[in-house]
Image (cartoon, rainbow, N blue to C red):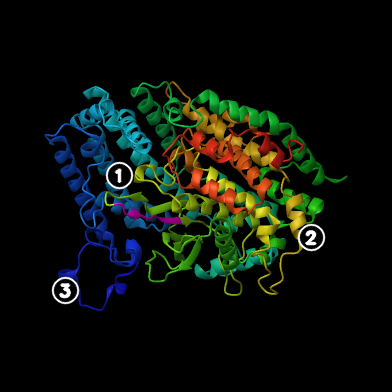
Amino acid sequence: MMSEATMGQQGPAEQKAERKNPFFEPYNTPHDTAPFDRIRMEDYEEAFMEGIRRDKEYLDKTINNPAKPSFDNTIINKDDDSEGYYDLLDRVSTVFFNLLSAETNDEMDALAQKMSPILTQHANDMRLNEQLFERVRYVHRHHRKLTPEEKRLLDDCYQGFVRSGALLSKEGKDRLRQLTEEASLLGLQFSQNLLKENKAYTLHITDEQQLDGLPQTAIDAAAEEARQRQLEGWVFTLDAPSYSPFMTYSTQRELRRQMYMAYNTKGIHDNENNNLEVCKRLINLRREIAQLLGYKTYADYVLSRRMAKNIRGVYRLLNQLVDAYKPTAEKEIAELKKSCSTRRQKPALEPWDMGFYSHKLKLKKYNIDAEMLRPYFQLDKVISGVFGLATRLYGITFQENKDIPVYHPDVKAYEVFDRDGSYLAVFYADFHPRKGKQGGAWMTQYQGQWIDRKGKNVRPHVSVVMNLTKPTPDKPALLTLGEVETFLHEFGHALHGMFSNCRFESLSGTNVLWDFVELPSQFMENFAVEKEFLRTFAFHYETGKPLPDELIHRIVRSRNFMAATACLRQVSFGLLDMAYYTKKDEFTDDIIAFEKQAWAKAIIGKQRTDTCMTTQFSHIMAGGYAAGYYSYKWAEVLDADAFAVFKRHGIFNQKTAQRFRDCILSRGATDDPMTLYKNFKGSEPTIDALLKRNGIKKK
């Protein structure tokens, strides 16, 4: 959080007398953006508790309304006619939990532990209130003629109550409260343990010879990391911009082994951050919740509200992918093993060797390597290129506004304007790793989009949070092609949020079925290897020369290098996820042994028994993807199919882009996702485009 020194020059007594909790009053910031510079730690709990009080007041007002229940006085009756209306609990929760992932500290972690059961209990109080549910059920059965969007909101509202236990007996509701409160706390504990594990490990090198093979960018970044920690030499961490280059380029096999084992044993060490029992309990809690609600398994519960529909639909896709990709993946691994063998030596290919020898083979076959491209991917230029892509496709423009408060100096805030010059959204971009930030990359929002009763279109405030290569004192931030793809991916989610044009916030933006939400993001990744796009921003950071045609040709030729192996890796994660959440009986197995068996059909070669993915698998343990990790592959079928339409008409074709915006990006969850997709393309997707793109099927 910002320091108290930023709050002005009054004395302490004067500050205390005059200061109000910023969550309780109009923000008075550009576009009503969150006033990060004014928020103090003590503001959160006060706002949480007042937000809960207001919610209870609203509940009493609703259930005691003498008028017959209706769509207008029960489903959408919050008083948003009042000037400056806002949902206080949503307002403070959004800021707090976003920062808990992007900029946390010990105080925030402690408050999260304290508030989690209170907030879960409050959510249960609302969802399990019998009088409120009876009003909702009455409206669901007896309502005025509704628009399609109103009908969808009503159905979602009713199903939300049912899926939250509204039809259970009193005993069942009491048990559900216990289970959900415990699951909420354990999910938080999982994330906090993982962050601590990730930040606890460093590889500190003082012997320059141990840097052999590493590119200068990785060496410079490690030297800067050591300097910031007040150490001599070089420090490597488990953050992606540090870990990935080390595993790809270091000739020091023993050090690669150490890094690999540190990364792949997070959460299984004999310490207070061990996640093994946490995972077991989370799996069992979710199974019991689903069975209490009348489902055989947690996967059955989740998939009843997904495009895939059921367990059978998920396994059909995953098995199709194993059958299609495994023969090619086996050939890829065989070629890799052959490439690292000599007449004198045939080393066993260990997991910590995969990145190293894959890089060597790729260099040999295509004469291309991530470091060759890095000088052409200066972050500032990449930002311009990504924004320019959105301008070219959709006519929108971005303008940095330094008057918009941000929560860390790394964060940039932009105003986004539509083709006609009207204000569209606020966009935050948070690029680099730091101490209080979770690993990975994600999109979130600080304000959703909706249209209030007076007809005002409240525009969204969206944010992308990443862990990209940091600048050093001597060089700007220079990205890999993979990092450019990550940026495009999260930016695709952001466009989905920014273009939203829905009446109700709960149906707007990215509030869609989870196996549809990755379509806009994965769709954007396709542009990363398109020459026409690369030509707009890929210039050498020192010479200004464009990325040579020959390098672009090599990028395209090498695009499917080890693609089948990469696909099976994603499928293996999907299989693991489904194995846990299709359990009908109590899960008592050893996590590590179960994991190895669960994904065995997608694994080539012998597995290690001293590593574990589950204990660091945030998506399915704490990130909302439980019984839903298959969504990435499901959406990949959609994105390949959709991009094929763009390829036919031209990747910058504005008519096609406008149709994509109108049919998908702006519609949120206002219609069935397959209907939205067919409105765009004219037919349902097939797996063919994906197989062709990956070189599995000839064009």
Marking on residue 13? 3
User: Which sits earlier in the primary sequence, circle 1 or circle 3?
Assistant: 3
Residues packed near mark 1 inside 10 Å, few (<14), some (14 to 19) or many (20 plus)? some
Q: Position of residue 548 (x, y in %)?
A: 76, 64
Whether residue 118 appears in this view of the structure is yes
**In the image, which residues are magenta?**
455-463
Q: Amino acid at mark 3?
A: Ala
Image mark count: 3
The residue singled out by tag 2 in the image is 550
Depth check, front residue: 113 or 37: 37
Left or right of 103, for residue 329 = right
Q: Earlier in the sequence, mark 2 or mark 1?
A: 1
Residue 471: percent from the left, percent from the top? 57, 68
Furthest residue in direction right, as rendered: 343
Horizontal relation, residue 539 to residue 226: left or right = right
In this rendering, the answer to whether 49 lies above or below 174 is below
Q: Residues within 10 Å of mark 2 (few under 14, many from 20)?
A: few
